[in-house]
Amino acid sequence: MNDMPSESSRELDYAGPDVPSGDTSHRSLEGMHGSVAVPVHSAGFWRQYRAFAGPALLVSVGYMDPGNWATDLAGGAQYKYNLMWVVALSSFMAIFLQVCSARLGIVTGKDLAQACRDYYPAWTRIPNWLGTELAIMAWDLAEVLGCAVAMHLLLRHVPLFWAVIITAADVLLLLSLQSRGMRVIEAFILVLVVTIGTCYFIELFVLPTIKPSFGQIGGAIVRPGFTNPRTDLFDIGMVYVAIGIVGATVMPHNLYLHSALVQTRAFQKDDASVKRAIQLNTVDSVVALSIAFLVNASIMVLAAITFYGRDHVMTSTGKVVDLAQEGHDWIQLAYLTLEPLLGVASASVLFAVALLASGLSSTVTGTLAGQVVMEGFMHWRIRPWLRRAVTRLLAIIPAVVVIGLRGDNAVNDLLTLSQVVLGLQLPLAMIPLLHFTSSKRRMGRFANGKVLLAVGWTSCALITALDVYLLAGMIFNSSH
């Protein structure tokens, strides 16, 4: 008890160098704000780390959602391990951006949405809010599809159309979790992330028919390039898939969410405690996003082992699929081919269980991000279950309409649509984040240093350019 901060020793309402303390209005996730006690900054590392660990874990699930699965599966199936360096680079850039997001929340006491509202002209408020809400709905569309595909694959008699509708019931899950506090939510997400990791560990290291070449994987990470392994020539198709991997990795809502989640920790506000909080949240981000990288790398490895070098595959139903054709629904195809190709019935089930865990975990964090954005930009508060119901309904409608009209094979098209919307919104989150965290006026002595400045703005420029290129390519392809 002696090493916990007392109310008298805590500057409860510190809001950054240029914001007066005492402003307690419109806190993000108010019921959870400052709800997790932490030891004082002089306590041991592990005691403090256990208290601070969690926010980055919630954020990390956005880096292994169904959108990532689709691009990683396509990359491994078509180019083996040769795009593994893109997965690693995307994760590296994501770590720096999430570190900046956590730093903003810790130092200023504001999340990114609140900072945009308070520091930018009033006329930007509604456009920024609407754009971010659209991105969250697009991201939720990917989670709808992930959960629906997993249920459709695990329960073969449930059509994909009805599986999409069933996903609306996840509002009950969220209502139950949020009523139990932040630590329960973090524990739930931890269980799901461990489930995902365990499924891939079993598939890659336990199943006797799978033998990944770690030498080739390591070589692919340190030798970037776009040379097709089959032709030894530059391949524009590899560039396109690489852009898709980058575009599916860094999510705009995560930058808003992380800056709010770090404020659930009741740390002291003196300089030493703030510095310690930044350090521990940086470690938390590195650990959590490294796990996300390993999951995405595992997906690509599994796809490479299962599909690469094959002209055709046979599904568990006996159907022969020509891999030379474009536009495969890789998520469903991977599940259907794992069993006959690997000779183990549990392989396909493990894949679907991991996919379901991915969708469920993203469901929780997506709703939290929606609350942060609405409360931060507009100072509106609605009940979490209502917020979740509206967001999920707006994601289900396009999924139901498109699948109803075009059938189960429309999943890839919908995932592509969601990534386009996210790509458009991403610069509108990255640029303000780096602007604020690089400002000594806003951040004081905790403004980004030279390394964060260089890596952050370089990542922002690269991701923005790739997203614009990807968007232009999708528009061109859709018009021909």
Image (spheres, rainbow, N blue to C red):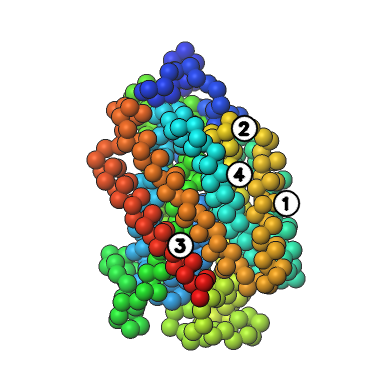
Tell me the element at label 4: helix
The quadrant where residue 284 appears = top left
Disc 2 vs disc 3: which is toward the camera? 3
User: What separation in Å lies between label 4 and label 2 (alpha carbons)?
Assistant: 15 Å
Residue 169 numbered tag? 1
Disc number lying in front (1 or 3): 3
Q: CA distance from mark 1 to mark 3?
A: 33 Å
Label 1 Cα neighbours within 10 Å, binned few <14 / some 14-19 / many ≥20:
few
Image height of 15 relative to 316, above or below: above
Asked whether the beta carbons under mark 2 and mark 3 sit within 8 Å of each other, the answer is: no
Residue 471 numbered tag = 3
Nearest the viewer among 387 and 461 is: 461
Residue 397 x, y percent position in the rendering: 69, 57
Q: Which mark is residue 380?
A: 2
Q: Position of residue 153 (x, y in %)?
A: 66, 69
The kind of residue tagged 4 is Thr
